[in-house]
Image (spheres, rainbow, N blue to C red):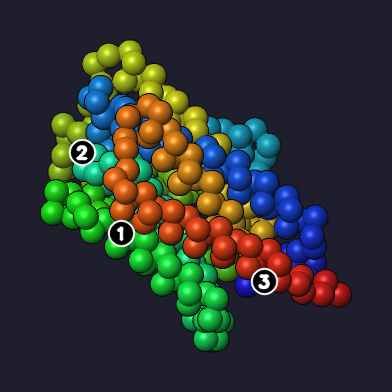
Amino acid sequence: MTITNPNSGHPPNLATRLDGRVWALIAASSLGLNTTLASLAYGLGATPLLIAAVRALVAACILGLWLRSRGMPAFHPRDWKALFVATLATTGVSVGYLGSVFFIPVSLAAIIFYTFPLVVAGANALIERRVPTAGESGLFLLAFAGLVLAIGPSFQSLDWRGIALAGLASTSSATLFIVAARRLGHLNDLAVSFQINLFGGGVVALGALALFPSMLVLPGNVAGVALIGAICLAYLVGVTTLFTAVKQAGPAKTALFFNIEPLVSIALAFLLLGERFSGPQLLGGACVITALMLGSLQRAHRPLPPTA
């Protein structure tokens, strides 16, 4: 897919795309920290809804202050429909992914969630009214086989809620990437981040307050609160750089550069949580990540479209 620069009307040049890839790697690394830190925080009394609400509202407050100090508009009422969809998608990612690691291991949740780059590539083919190439179809099949291997052997012992929430997060993330590139690319990145976090965090907080008020209570220890603070910082860096990456590199390219995020999540889960894969799960995870990397290489070797 090609993204046009809203100021020039032409596709971004090579330098811009390389910048977009750097932002994508920064976003992926920062967001990759979140689930492992969240799993540690759950052991100290935090809950998924608490973390989802707090990190979004903290990010919105900081972004709002930054925009105000720069005299930049924070709201874009003309684009409310796209922003509404992006807010719902972001909320689905946040609640789904953070909630999934409350029920299933971080490493398995990461494998399920990070099928979303392939969903983005497939959705782009449908939107552009073209048949997926043989290579794209092969990558989908490889990733699906990897999911079957990763989930299948221990399916009976896994909590279905964790699998469903990770699937919700993956679908929501694909939606966010597509909407951000096709409908929000002309807006200021920080303003978009501010709005979707403000409204998304507000919805989560109000919903939890009405239905599950006990889940909004802070941990009664310094370590738990400190972990939530670290999650907020990593999330702020990740979410602000994500939109810059999508605008500069396009949704498919950015999504596929997120290959590093599941590796960060899995490595941290191995080091900090002591998680281990069985043989079939290891093979399945390798299949999914291989599919993502091959997809990234496939797109990287396509010729850039003319810029004039």
| Kind of residue at badge 3 | Thr
Q: Is residue 179 visible?
A: no
Question: Distance of mark 2 from mark 3, alpha carbons?
Answer: 42 Å
* Residue visible at 35% across and 66% down in the picture: 145
Query: Which part of the image, by quadrant, shows the N terminus?
Result: bottom right
* Residue visible at 41% across and 64% down in the picture: 143
The residue that disc 1 covers is: 149
Compared across the picture, whether 138 is left or right of 297 comes to left
| Kind of residue at badge 1 | Leu
The residue that disc 2 covers is: 209
Q: Residue 149 location, x and y as percent?
A: 30, 59
Answer above or below: position of 126 versus 109.
below
- Mark 2 vs mark 1, foreground winner is 1
Question: Distance of mark 2 from mark 1, alpha carbons?
Answer: 39 Å
* Residue found at the very far right of the displayed protein: 308
Answer above or below: position of 221 versus 303.
above
Verify CB contact (< 8 Å) between mark 2 and mark 3.
no
Label located before the other in sequence (2 or 1): 1
Label located before the other in sequence (3 or 1): 3
| SS type, badge 3 | loop
- Mark 2 vs mark 3, foreground winner is 3
| SS type, badge 2 | helix
Q: Quadrant of residue 208?
A: top left
Query: Which part of the image, by quadrant, shows the C terminus?
Result: bottom right
The residue that disc 3 covers is: 2
* Residue visible at 21% across and 43% down in the picture: 103
Answer above or below: position of 235 versus 21.
above
Q: Residue 133 location, x and y as percent?
A: 55, 81
| SS type, badge 1 | helix
